[in-house]
Amino acid sequence: MKVIITGKNFNASDHLKGVIEAKFQKLGKYFSDDIVANVTLVAERGRQKIEATINARGTIFRAEDTTNGAYNEVDRVVDKLSSQMSRFKTKLRRTHNDGKAIMFLDIPDLPQSEEAEEMKIVKRKKFDLLPMSVDEAILQMELLEHNFFVFLDMESDGVGVVYKRNDGNYGLLETEY
């Protein structure tokens, strides 16, 4: 696994980069060699945050942690990623049954009491996609008091999703075909 470390308002020491590489190489045994882990170190409001994303050929593992100590955060993020893999091992095996991207034999099984709950849909909702601009979609989302809104983007002719971020700003998800 290749580990790419970037910083936003944060200059990581060589020692910290080495620790991150070593911790993520432990997760590397679960993946093929061509899989990339993107680790972002962010300094905001006097705190440090680590975000990690691993894209295993269509299945995305993501974890983040915020504390005052970057070294502890690395351990927690790696633990979260490992836990995700263990919890969803059976479901992932159905999707990646070729075993080329994810090495299932190496992923530890969870104890029976911690087995992943069955994911089920408890409600379905259908609605018309209305063509609108991104600004109109944000306004509609706020009027509905939702934290996301799906719409037909007039500019791109694709489906878009606007969402409210934890920092109070907005995000936009755009589809590609």
Image: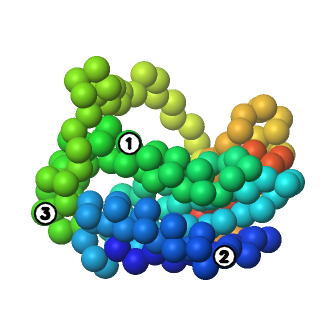
The one nearer the camera, 44 or 57, is 44
**Residue matched to label 3:** 98
The span from disc 1 to disc 3 (Cα, nearest Å) is: 22 Å
Question: Is residue 36 among what the camera can see?
Answer: yes
Residue 110: image quadrant is top left
Identify the residue at image location x=68%, y=73%: 12
Q: In the picture provided, is 147 more to the left or to the right than 106?
A: right
Numbered-mark total: 3
Residue at 42%, 22% in the rendered image = 122
Q: Nearer the viewer, mark 2 or mark 1?
A: 2
Q: Earlier in the sequence, mark 2 or mark 1?
A: 2
The kind of residue on which mark 3 rests is Asp
Q: Is residue 63 visible?
A: no
Where's residue 154, x and y in %? 69, 64
The crowding category of the residue bearing disc 1, from other C-alpha atoms within 10 Å (few below 14, some 14 to 19, many at least 20), is: some
Occupied quadrant, residue 86: top left
* Contact check, label 1 and label 3, Cβ < 8 Å: no
Q: Position of residue 165 (x, y in %)?
A: 74, 48
Residue topped by disc 1: 83
Looking at marks 3 and 2 on the same chain, the residue that comes earlier in the sequence is marked by: 2
Q: Secondary structure at mark 2?
A: loop
Mark 2 = which residue?
13
